[in-house]
Amino acid sequence: MNAVQSKQASHLLPSMAVALCGAVWGGFWVPLHWFASEGVGGAWVALIFNAMAMFSALPWLLRRDAWAGAADQALSGLLLGTAFSLYTVSLVLTDVVHSILLFYLTPVWSTLAGRFFLRQRLSPSRILAMVMGFAGLASVLGFKDGIPLPRNWGDGLALVSGMLWAAGTLRSFHRPTRKVAMSVFSFAAGGCLSSALILAAAAALALPLAEPGHLRDMLPWIILLGLIIFVPPNFLVLWAAQRIDSARVGILLMTEVLFGTLSAGLLSGQPFTLAEGLGTALIVSAGLIEVIRR
């Protein structure tokens, strides 16, 4: 086997892992809606999933030197964990397609953050990605009531979660760590903190998000699904990101958008309009332009 074939083979497994994780996450909304039908709010699921991921990372962090750089990773983890918590909650508060697409406007927010905070130059490709992202946003939200604004709390949380995810990934890119367990722990700890705050706020406002419903009965299923669709994919994606370039990771994760919108259109019973189809195409294209540029 020559060097080129060896390199391609070494990239095959991590590439397949990322694509598979994206596809699995595309169906993340299905168990969330099932739990919601049993009265278990999305914030409870996010809290349990993150707690599982946090404790699963601890065996790799038993040595004192494994905690080097933990303080630096804490802010990135808080941003990314909060983004996940808000995204999880949004999936049960608005149409699934809206939630997924509004979250995946990350190329737009990454471009703006890079321009204003890192003084990055706006290349023609970045401008095109940003224009397509905003066009996709407008198509998804629609112009029925004038300016295309989020229709409900779920839309708003999905939009904010994408902004926080962009900020977290931008910071992680510029302040990386090769300790996968520390990245997972920081992410999950941030998610636990934000989920607990969401639950406290929802309880104070007497919102359904804070209702445990049949949490005790559903807990075994939540744990089982967390061990399948949350904990392993987190480790796999962070492991793969150390072995293949970030552009390829970004492209392969687009399977979440494709599988998420497809499964929602087929299974959710929520209408998938032509405008949402156009928005999907524009937002996916914006993401592809951004990661190919990198």
Image (spheres, rainbow, N blue to C red):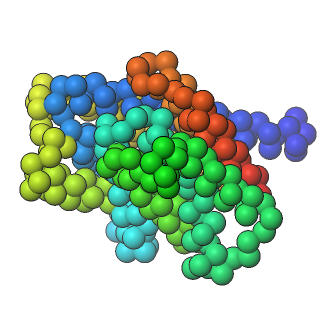
Q: Is residue 138 visible?
A: yes
Name the foreground residue: 200 vs 285: 285
Q: Is residue 47 above or below residue 21?
A: below
User: Would you identify the image quadrant in which residue 255 lies?
Assistant: top right
Residue 101: x, y in percent?
52, 43
Q: Residue furthest right?
A: 2
User: Could you tell whether 252 is left or right of 157 in the image?
Assistant: right
Q: Identify the residue shown where x is 61% and y is 55%.
A: 134
Q: Is residue 61 visible?
A: no
Name the foreground residue: 48 vs 203: 203
Name the foreground residue: 130 vs 210: 130
Pick the quarter of the image with the N terminus: top right
User: Would you identify the image quadrant in which residue 39 lies?
Assistant: top left
Pick the quarter of the image with the C terminus: bottom right
Residue 81: x, y in percent?
37, 56
Residue 186: x, y in percent?
37, 61
Q: Identify the residue shown where x is 66% and y is 81%.
A: 119
Q: Is residue 8 above or below residue 70?
A: above
User: Could you tell whether 8 is left or right of 132 in the image?
Assistant: right
Give the total of numbered labels. Answer: 0
Q: Is residue 62 above or below residue 65?
A: above
Q: Identify the residue shown where x is 56% and y is 63%.
A: 109
Name the foreground residue: 8 vs 23: 23
User: Could you tell whether 39 is left or right of 95 in the image?
Assistant: left
Q: Identify the residue shown where x is 75% and y is 58%.
A: 128
